[in-house]
Amino acid sequence: MADHPNVELVRRGYAAFGSGDMDTLRELIAADVVWHSGGHNPLSGDFEGLDATLGLFARFFEVTGGDMSQELHAVLADDEHAVVLLKQHLGRPDGRSYDGNDVHVFHIADGKVTEFWAYSEDEAASDAALA
Amino acid sequence: MADHPNAEAARTAIEAFAKGDVATMAASIADDATWHVPGSNRFSGDFKGGAAVLGRFQQMGEAGLHTSIDEIHDVVGGDDHVVALVKLTITAGDVSASAGAVWVMHVKDGMLHDFWGMNDNQAEIDRVIG
């Protein structure tokens, strides 16, 4: 089967995130988005609105010093959701790091991301790297 | 767009699990299936082979643990993977824990092979299961 259009949408989003292309992220994420950042660490929680969400992205860049990458393993989508299976890498300037399998779930409406949830295969390890 | 055929196969298995229809579940899980179950409770870990996977479900029942599927929010499929977004509650006697769960499955020819589960409330689920 051909890829669902929502597959292309989230792939563009990861490319934009990886290159710090905030204009494209602003185009792809709804103004009233709700971003559920998983885990129990200082970057966890619910971020409401595009500005708060882009602010969270900036915090991730800040705490990792830019040592952060996502290798997409699979991107699945239907009319409402896109699901991304990925290898997440987060490094900290003090030497801590997290490398694990994560799942990102996007709710998509009218070509924009309206809600996001993140799951980690090893939440404790991710929390330890971000504490 | 219509659901991917792999999503339909996975949905059939999940609906069977929700209803306790063991025969349909057994017919959906491949002999070489491996179930990667998250957390740090007595039913966590890797269960290899269809018999071990079904045996785990049976042992949980015998231990007085009941898993109810509160909502199958969506089942999203591709050519190799299916991801189900579900809400579930695990009950042991008079204690219970609810979680949003993501189930990642390898599906081939209508059969479930590998399974990975992730819960957004793992610590509490571990506490209820023990």
Image (cartoon, rainbow, N blue to C red):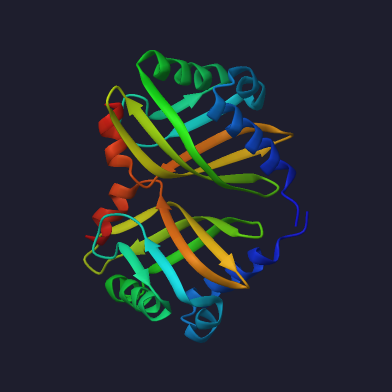
Find residue B51 and report its image quarter. Answer: top right
Placement of the N terminus of chain B among the 4 image quadrants: bottom right
Give above or below for B4 relative to A57: above
Q: Measuring from the top left, give residue B43's x and y in whole percent.
A: 37, 25
Q: Measuring from the top left, give residue A1's x and y in whole percent.
A: 78, 53
Q: Please, which residue is most extreme toward the top here?
A: B62
Q: Nearer the viewer, residue B62 or B35?
A: B62
Give above or below for B82 relative to A13: above
Find residue B16 and report its image quarter. Answer: top right
Q: Measuring from the top left, give residue A83's x and y in whole percent.
A: 56, 56
Q: Measuring from the top left, give residue B17's x and y in whole percent.
A: 55, 27
Q: Please, which residue is most extreme toward the right here?
A: A1
How many numbered discs? 0
Find residue A37 and report its image quarter. Answer: bottom left
Q: Please, which residue is most extreme toward the bottom here?
A: A23
Q: Seen in the image, is B25 located left or right of residue A126?
A: right
Give above or below for A69 relative to B117: below
> Which residue appears at 48% of the width and 65% of the height?
A115
> Which residue appears at 48% of the width and 57% of the height?
A104
Placement of the C terminus of chain B among the 4 image quadrants: top left
Give above or below for A45 relative to B44: below
Q: Seen in the image, is B94 located left or right of residue B75?
A: left
Q: Nearer the viewer, residue B93 or A3?
A: B93
Q: Seen in the image, is B83 located left or right of residue A4?
A: left
> Which residue appears at 41% of the width and 52% of the height?
A119
